[in-house]
Image (spheres, rainbow, N blue to C red):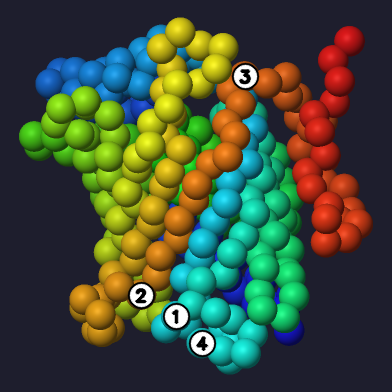
Amino acid sequence: MLGRLAATLGAVAAAGTIAVASSERGDQRAPAMTLKRLSQARAAMGGQELLTIKTLSFKARQRIRNRFFGQAPPSVAAEYAEAMFEARILLPDHFLYERLLRFRLGEGRSRGGFAGNKPLGSADINQERRLFGYNYALPLFLGVDTAFPFSLREVAGDTLSFRDPDNAEVLLDLDPDTQLPSRVRYKMGMQGEQRDIVTQIGDYRHIPGFRSLVLPYKLVQYAKSPSKPEGGLVMVQETIFETIEVNVPLTPKDFAVVAVKGPSARLGQPRARS
């Protein structure tokens, strides 16, 4: 039962989860002023250093709200499920994660991602790419030219408008004072209705080893529905990063999936380089 609950919560989080980076695809269709605003956001995060990101490895703590979904009775699932989340990324198309969910009566583990066109878990690879794009690439490092690309279309004030691979609109809000990304907004189908998803981005910190690169260490995701009580709030996922390492040595071999050996298992360390 705990295994099924872990899988359900993982799928809920994933469903909530961009391509312009140097972006011929998105940039050619975007007006000059729109490109200028994107360049300002990149400059605020580190400019050229942001564009040199090739790999990331991070560990985070998560809280995933468990209300309104009915995955388990109160004896098993509290209002929030606590989780440890670890992931590694090799751009543009390798992503491997592991989530350890903790419940009142035990633990549940999920693992997934993709290596090129190969899924690294039981979830659909398109769902995993969407998780990567919406939940990590765009809000974490303004990654818009990845395995889940976003095309930049227009700007209105401090809001950039993108289109995802399904032509759905994605809005990225910039802080008017710092020009740093502050919020991602989009709609997602959930339980038979379209829901507004909002990811708040914050707690920017300097990344060791870089002169000016800053990345957010806190992402808080909200899902709202007008048909639900409490102002429409139906889900919250909070991700607080404990460590973020950029441009660590990774190759496709570091995305080989090995068997999970127990509750304390973690993603293996990247292979040593000679």
Q: Earlier in the sequence, mark 3 or mark 4?
A: 4
Q: Using the image as rendered, state which of residue 164 and residue 6 is in the foreground.
A: 6
Quarter containing the C terminus: top right
Residue 154 vs residue 23: left or right?
A: left
Q: Does dot 1 land on a helix, a strand or a loop?
A: loop
Q: Position of residue 50 (x, y in %)?
A: 44, 18
* 72 sits left or right of 152 in the view: right
Q: Amino acid at mark 3?
A: Asn
- What amino acid is at disc 4? Gly
Residue with the mark numbered 1: 67
What's the CA distance linking mark 1 and mark 3?
38 Å
Please tell me which of labels 3 and 2 falls first in the chain.
2
Neighbour class for label 2 at 10 Å: few (<14), some, many (≥20)? many
Residue type pointed to by label 2: Val
Residue position marked by numbered label 3 in the rendering? 247
Is 103 rendered above or below residue 186? below
Task: Please give the residue where the numbered disc 4 appears in the rendered image.
Answer: 70
Question: Label 4 to label 2, Cα distance in Å?
Answer: 12 Å
Q: Where residue 236 sits: x, y (%)?
A: 40, 65
Disc sitting over residue 228 in the figure = none
Label whose residue precedes the other's in the sequence (4 or 2): 4
